[in-house]
Image: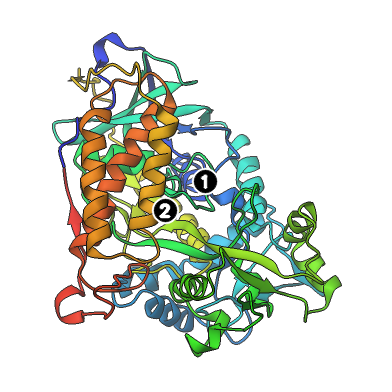
């Protein structure tokens, strides 16, 4: 795939420049945790695409997995993670992250995070794929919001962290093979600013907006991953996109996530005939791994010719359910659904990007001076499929590691900022309908690169994306919506190509024409470099 080196042409000698020791791009759990750790070593500039509080982290409901409950162990958590990863986890990485889980949670508690308790003790629940109750939650189903609130307070109170909101990362500045900062648009305006940083940490989250159906907020357009690709970083596991099985599905409603913890509390899945179908697909039924449940729902939708299946909580104590999941109860009530009496219509949606910018155990990418953490990074922790509630854990651990490693290795003497001049596409945006192009792309990927994939659909996706990219990637847009479209086109092509190349089914990647997992040929990682 041929892509321009940058979204906009620029010459850094002609741009306003902001100087800092470390630049962190993204304000979810990974970004804020990285900033706090990096701030121990130097000045930190924390850039966020929208408001500081807006990220995928904010919408995480289920909780954070940590082996702290009675009868649990690091070993058990490791084995569950490895099993969910279908042979592509790095055991060393998995063991290291889960060993770091307890210290990271204890930090949050020390900083004032208010996780739910029963009789004064931390309350843990169980989710699909976990053999123990180890999911720590807050506010019932508002765990992400509680963690965000805690970290925001901490960031705001840290004097050498400067926050720059409503700032779009256009591209990374790489000179002589080393990352020296980023090119950003503040408030959606051009000309952009050059960020002069000795170390840069990407924590830009996922790319759920590539799909028509997604649990992700509007900002999740994969900007950091696309920028890393253009800069020459190695990407890995691009075919693995996780689809959350239970998303609220009512005409006119946004696709709101319904936490896996709901099934962990005993909710069951039924089709439109009232049949409970999950026991036919997996011995763990509703508590099977997410990829299994998502495919089962898709199959049942096809069998029943209904646009959804239904989540049933009516057999559970109504008051207890409303107290445990207040946000879900309120959402359903808005649409005239009483979760104590009625079934909840659901279907799968794109939820989490398992692949990303290839990183090592400390968050280092293939480009010196550039780090990545959280959903945008690919550390081989999740393998081919993320275990539920391991994402917040990953963000906390890798955010802290990347911030520490980058901070400890700051140059002792600041170097002059080099001149960088890049020529990008100069096509005219006049006549381009960004909304229509974005909707066409999202519909295509949902149809052909979604829960189930096959050769004909993947080939069609590649052909269409290549055609659109032929003119859209060479347009010089002057607004974030255009830049987001270009990033999504780039990532859509990479994901489609990776999915077509992996001719087997493994974890989140299911090929209906190659339905068997083939360890002999495909128990390996696919990497990509511009």
Q: Which residue is mark 2?
A: 375
Quarter location, residue 416: top left
Quick one: label 2, few (<14), some, or many (20+) residues within 10 Å? many
Query: In the figure, is residue 164 to the left or right of 195?
Result: right
Query: In the figure, is residue 116 to the left or right of 521?
Result: right
Report the number of numbered marks: 2
> Measuring 51% from the left and 70% from the top, which residue is drawn there?
301
Quarter location, residue 93: bottom left
Q: Residue 96 bears which disc, if any? A: none
> Measuring 73% from the left and 65% from the top, which residue is drawn there?
116
Q: Which residue is mark 1?
A: 28
The span from disc 2 to disc 1 (Cα, nearest Å) is 10 Å
Q: Position of residue 337 (x, y in %)?
A: 78, 61
Q: Give the secondary structure at mark 2.
A: helix
Q: Give the secondary structure at mark 1.
A: loop
Q: Tell me if residue 149 comes above or below residue 176 in the rendering.
A: below
* Picture colour scheme: rainbow
Q: Tell me if residue 344 comes above or below residue 215 in the rendering.
A: below
> Measuring 25% from the left and 44% from the top, which residue is drawn there?
464
First of labels 2, 1 by sequence position: 1
CB under 8 Å between discs 2 and 1:
yes
Query: In this view, which residue lies farthest toward the front?
Result: 305
Q: Observer-nearest residue: 457 or 366?
A: 457
Q: Position of residue 43 (x, y in %)?
A: 44, 31
Q: Observer-nearest residue: 81 or 409?
A: 81
Q: Observer-nearest residue: 4 or 449?
A: 449
The quarter in which the C terminus is drawn is top left
> Measuring 27% from the left and 58% from the top, which residue is drawn there?
457
Q: Determine if residue 373 is in view.
A: no
């Amino acid at each position: 795939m041929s892509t321009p080196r940058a979204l906009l042409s620029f010459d850094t000698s002609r741009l306003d420049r902001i100087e800092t020791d470390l630049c962190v791009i993204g304000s979810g759990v990974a970004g804020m945790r990285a900033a706090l750790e990096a701030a121990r070593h130097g000045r930190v500039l924390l850039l966020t695409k929208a408001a500081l509080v807006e990220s995928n982290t904010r919408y995480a409901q289920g909780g954070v997995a940590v082996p702290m409950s009675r009868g649990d162990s690091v070993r058990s958590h490791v084995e569950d993670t490895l099993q969910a990863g279908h042979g592509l986890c790095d055991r060393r990485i998995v063991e290291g992250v889960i060993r770091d889980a307890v210290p990271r949670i204890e930090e949050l508690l020390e900083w004032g995070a208010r996780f739910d308790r029963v009789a004064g003790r931390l309350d843990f629940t169980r989710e699909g794929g976990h053999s123990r109750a180890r999911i720590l939650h807050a506010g019932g189903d508002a765990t992400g919001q509680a963690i965000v609130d805690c970290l925001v307070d901490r960031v705001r109170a840290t004097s050498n962290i400067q926050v720059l909101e409503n700032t779009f990362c256009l591209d990374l500045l790489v000179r002589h093979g080393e990352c020296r900062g980023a090119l950003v648009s503040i408030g959606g305006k051009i000309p952009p600013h050059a960020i002069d940083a000795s170390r840069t940490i990407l924590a830009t989250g996922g790319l759920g907006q590539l799909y028509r159906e997604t649990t992700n907020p509007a900002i999740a357009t994969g900007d950091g991953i696309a920028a890393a690709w253009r800069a020459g970083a190695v990407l890995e596991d691009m075919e693995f996109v996780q689809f959350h099985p239970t998303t609220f599905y009512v005409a006119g409603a946004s696709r709101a996530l319904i936490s896996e913890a709901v099934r962990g509390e005993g909710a069951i899945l039924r089709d439109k005939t009232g049949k409970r179908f999950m026991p036919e697909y997996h011995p763990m039924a509703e508590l099977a791994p997410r990829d299994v449940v998502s495919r089962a729902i898709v199959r049942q939708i096809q069998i029943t010719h209904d646009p959804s299946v239904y989540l049933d909580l009516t057999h559970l104590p109504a008051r207890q359910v409303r107290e445990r999941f207040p946000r879900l109860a309120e959402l359903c009530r808005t649409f005239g659904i009483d979760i104590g009496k009625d079934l909840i219509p659901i279907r799968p949606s794109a939820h989490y990007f398992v692949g990303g910018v290839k990183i090592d155990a400390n968050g280092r990418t293939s480009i010196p001076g550039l780090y990545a953490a959280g959903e945008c990074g690919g550390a081989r922790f999740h393998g081919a499929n993320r275990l539920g509630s391991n994402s917040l854990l990953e963000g906390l651990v890798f955010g802290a590691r990347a911030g520490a490693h980058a901070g400890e290795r700051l140059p002792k003497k600041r170097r002059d900022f080099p001149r960088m001049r890049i020529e990008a596409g100069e096509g005219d945006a006049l006549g381009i309908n960004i909304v229509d192009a974005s909707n066409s792309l999202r519909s295509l990927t949902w149809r052909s690169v979604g829960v189930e994939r096959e050769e004909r659909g993947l080939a069609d996706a590649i052909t269409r994306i290549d055609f659109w990219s032929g003119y859209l990637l060479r347009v010089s847009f002057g607004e974030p919506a255009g830049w987001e479209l270009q990033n999504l086109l780039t990532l859509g092509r990479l994901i489609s190509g990776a999915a077509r190349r992996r001719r087997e089914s493994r974890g989140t990647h299911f090929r209906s024409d190659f339905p068997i997992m083939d360890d002999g040929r495909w128990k390996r990682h696919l990497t990509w470099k511009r």
